[in-house]
Image: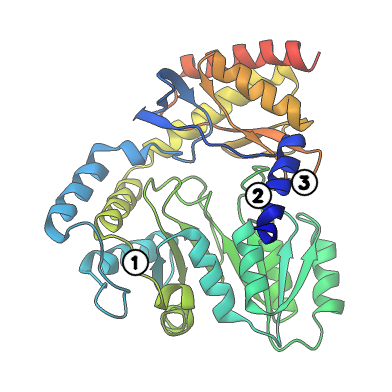
Amino acid sequence: MKRFDFIKSELLELKKEDLFRTMRTIENSDGPRVTIEGKELINFCSNNYLGLADHPKVIDRAITILRKYGVGAGASRLVSGNFDIHEQLETAIAEYEGTEAAIVFPTGYMANLGVIQAMVGHEDAVIVDRLNHASIIDGARLSGAKLLVYGHNYMEKLEKVLKKKAVGCRRKLIVSDFIFSMDGDIALAEEMLHLARKYDAMLMLDVAHSTGVVDLILPEGHNIILMGTLSKAIGALGGFVAGSQSLIDYLRNKARAFIYTTALPPAIAAAALASFEIISKDNSLQKKLWSNVEYLRKKLEPLKFDTIGSETQIIPLMIGDTKTTLDISQFLFDHGIFLSAIRPPTVPKDTSRLRLTVTAMHTKSDIDHLVSKLAEAKEEYLG
């Protein structure tokens, strides 16, 4: 049928530009090691930063609740899908984030869609960092609010937008990643909060990549909306919003992405709860992660890769050319390292990169092997 011809033509165009996406199939997983195509590799592109997805206590808690409640929640939280374990998890999140309350969504993507659409509409403005996650941009667009963009971590531009372009809007919502997922740098949260107060705007921080990794210290009475995920350092699945009790009550009644979807499976909620219990009592995994981050950064220094200002466990190795990035990723795969190429539209044109992530589960030997092969790849492909 001719009306579907565009699909084939657009797929061909993606292939010509080295932007066609395929998936590697993991056949087995054991900590930082995965098996793909029968080959064991060290995984350096996982967001399981603390290794909690494989933690025995997390697995045992999930199995216990799986046997008690079964697999699915059966309905939305407001119908018959609200279990005690969901409420226990929300209490634990609020305690961990230092807020009055929290609400859990089935994914982090849905949490961003839900909170932004609930907080603003056609008479309002959403002001976003240029490098924010796609779910923030999609939430802003779906809300119908005026979408205003400022340069990455550029506070003078943010103030100019608030002062000139957001004037006359009923509500103003500033939204930013806290740790930026592709660059690994950190938002200027204190400066953003100052500007939010100065221009009577709401501030929302996406702490997806910082929960459990970077301790976010905010002033008392800050009233910041915190959105996070359970699928990265927490090692499970789901999203959350933490804030005042009135905010959470409002989202429970207004966030369509919460109201009209089946609840998070109870066993997954139990796994996330176990993870929060572990990191609340013991910061040894966080310390091990940062020890590995520092060790890797020192080892990478002689290679002189452009890491574009990364400050965290996310270390982008900027390559630029898409085909070269793919070639280096395949070279590493052939030498026992799983490190995916990140290409447009996930990142801007001509900024293809290897998004390297280190975890608490990696050994120094793992890191040494990675750096050795990166040195070989750089010599062969980048000269």
- Residue 60: assigned label: none
Who comes first in sequence, dot 1 or dot 2? 1
Nearest the eye: 237 or 14: 14
Q: Are marks 1 and 2 in contact (CB under 8 Å)?
A: no
Nearest the eye: 245 or 143: 143
Q: Could you tell me residue 314's position as x and y percent?
A: 59, 38
Residue at 49% over, 36% down: 46
* In this rendering, the label closer to the viewer, 1 or 2: 1
Residue 89 appears left or right of 361: left
Image height of 118 relative to 313, above or below:
below
Q: Residues within 10 Å of mark 3 (few under 14, many from 20)?
A: few
- Residue 186: assigned label: 2
Image height of 158 relative to 56, above or below:
below
**For the residue labelled by badge 2, is the local secondary structure a helix, a strand or a loop?**
loop
The reply to whether residue 221 is visible in this rendering is no
**Mark 3 is on which residue type?**
Pro
Residue 25, image quadrant: top left
- Residue under circle 1? 90
